[in-house]
Image (spheres, rainbow, N blue to C red):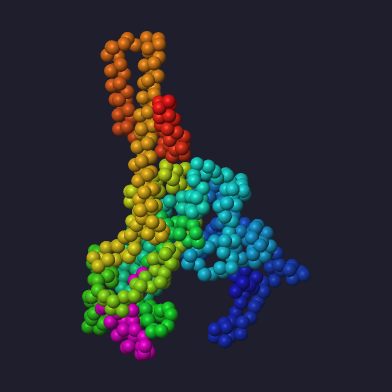
Amino acid sequence: MATAGSGLAKVDGSVKDSIEVTVHYDLSKFDKDGKVSLHLVREPRNETCLNCHSKPMWKKRGASFIAFTDVHIAKGLICVDCHVAGSMATDERIRGKEVHQFGKGDDPSGYVRNDLDNTIRTCNDCHLKGYLNAPIAKHEWLPSFHLEELSCQACHIPERKVKSALVQVSDVFNPGTKISPPSKYIWTFYDQNMNYWNHYGELSQYTAKDQPTDRFITQYAKYKGKIFPVNPVHSAWPAIYTKGEKGLHQPRMKDVYDMWMLHKKDNKKYPELSKIIDDNNDSIPEINRPEEIEAFINSVTELLNNLGYDMKNRQVVWVFNDRMYFNGTEYENLEKEIYESSPYASVYKYNHDVFPAKAALGSKGCTECHSLSSENMFNRKIVKYPFGEDGKPVFEPQYVRLGMNGFMVWLSGFREEYIKTMEYALVLFLLILIAFNLLFYLNQKYGFIPENSSYVAIIYVITAAGLLFIYLKPDLNSYILPERIWLDKNHFILSLIPFLTGISLAA
């Protein structure tokens, strides 16, 4: 294959058909000594990598690899600057090995070449050591445990611009268009906002450069001691459970597809499938009610019996995330990692499409993560199960998936959103009082405002009106008053103002 692919020769024959394979070299590619001069590029263009990787990375991670979404691409970096190989690598597992072996990261779902995990060039290599003249990252104001608990990606990939598949189920018939091959009609996808996504249909008409923009906020999970932004995929599928054996088998998807096609042509065949309907009105049926679960299990059982499967000591079950259903109401919880939605679905880390520092999570202050609102890191509602009995998603707070204490999360949010906000307001009020007292002191000394006159009241009214006007105009507010991030960065110093003022008054 390598010889034919390089264009050095024409290869005839077929191993599959037992036809002798012959190689006819193109002699014009060789010199008189039989040596070939190859066209080798030291640093392949991004397109070379993206020809294969762009579409899968779109589906799994919502990656787009364009300057608009990735600060590194905007600055001119290419894939092999991070996915290093050969003499460019620093890790001894790769360095100097001039083979098709690139540096790789460490994905919770990745089991390919785990021996090369974390051979990629890291954020620290560039932003702490200055590789490729990268700016040195400084987080002096941030408590050190943040850098111990959080990955760089957690703050610098706060959202995605391109949708990816949060849910992929393989049980019901999907009536979407342009899906190929036909057996894929029993694969149904939902995006990060739980909207139906005809993924295979879109692949038939879009390229990676035509990706539809569907902004979504990232989810987070703790993996190997650090919090990462991830896509924890949800799944539902038919399985074969064998008593006493670990793991599950899966019926052939082509057989399940044929079952649905037979039913669609004649609803007297596998008649229980008629009970499976669209409960959430998104145009796609889903299995979510007890009677639908029971109907699907019974239908697949009938299918396998008709096909002559040996079902001795085996039974058909329906797997829904971490639940293995034996019938409509009875299920067993499957063991899974805390960062997983399902032990039989993937969890993909986000590493590409990195935001610049000024757009990172936390760049507007601590409340971007620590607050009681629903759109921050910890209290945000994320999907626990794609479908409840009403067909709508079942949610849970993100801190549950992170294994965090709910009270401590609430306390940190209350502190940042209310206590510190009140403190900043009181510090401002105290500074105003100090300014007024200084003004009155100077007036007593120099007498530039007549005492017991209406001028003092006018000063109070103008000051109060000015503060109210600034408060009611957010654009003016942000222009005149310090930003929240500045207040949070200098929180300790600001806290000293009322403390020292109190001491001076007490003295």
Query: Bounds of the magenta span?
Result: 294-321
> What is the x, y in percent for residue 503?
43, 29
The residue closer to the viewer here, 401 or 228, is 401
Vertical comparison of 412 with 455: above or below? below
Vertical comparison of 58 with 305: above or below? above
Q: Residue at x 47, y 67 (%)?
A: 109
Residue 265 in view, yes or no? no
Q: Is residue 502 left or right of residue 50?
A: left
Vertical comparison of 326 with 223: above or below? below
Q: Is residue 281 left or right of residue 252?
A: left
**Which residue of the protein is positioned furthest toward the front in this rendering?**
507
> What is the x, y in percent for residue 24?
65, 76
User: Total label count?
Assistant: 0
Q: Is residue 458 left or right of residue 352?
A: left
**Which residue of the protein is positioned furthest toward the right in this rendering?**
33
Residue 100 belongs to magenta span: no
The residue closer to the viewer here, 90 or 244, is 244
> What is the x, y in percent for residue 272?
24, 80
Quadrant location of residue 22?
bottom right
Q: In which quadrant will I find the N terminus?
A: bottom right
Q: Residue at x 48, y 65 (%)?
A: 108
> What is the x, y in percent for residue 125?
60, 52
Q: In which quadrant will I find the C terminus?
A: top left
Residue 28 in view, yes or no? yes
Q: Residue at x 56, y 69 (%)?
A: 113
Residue 297 belongs to magenta span: yes
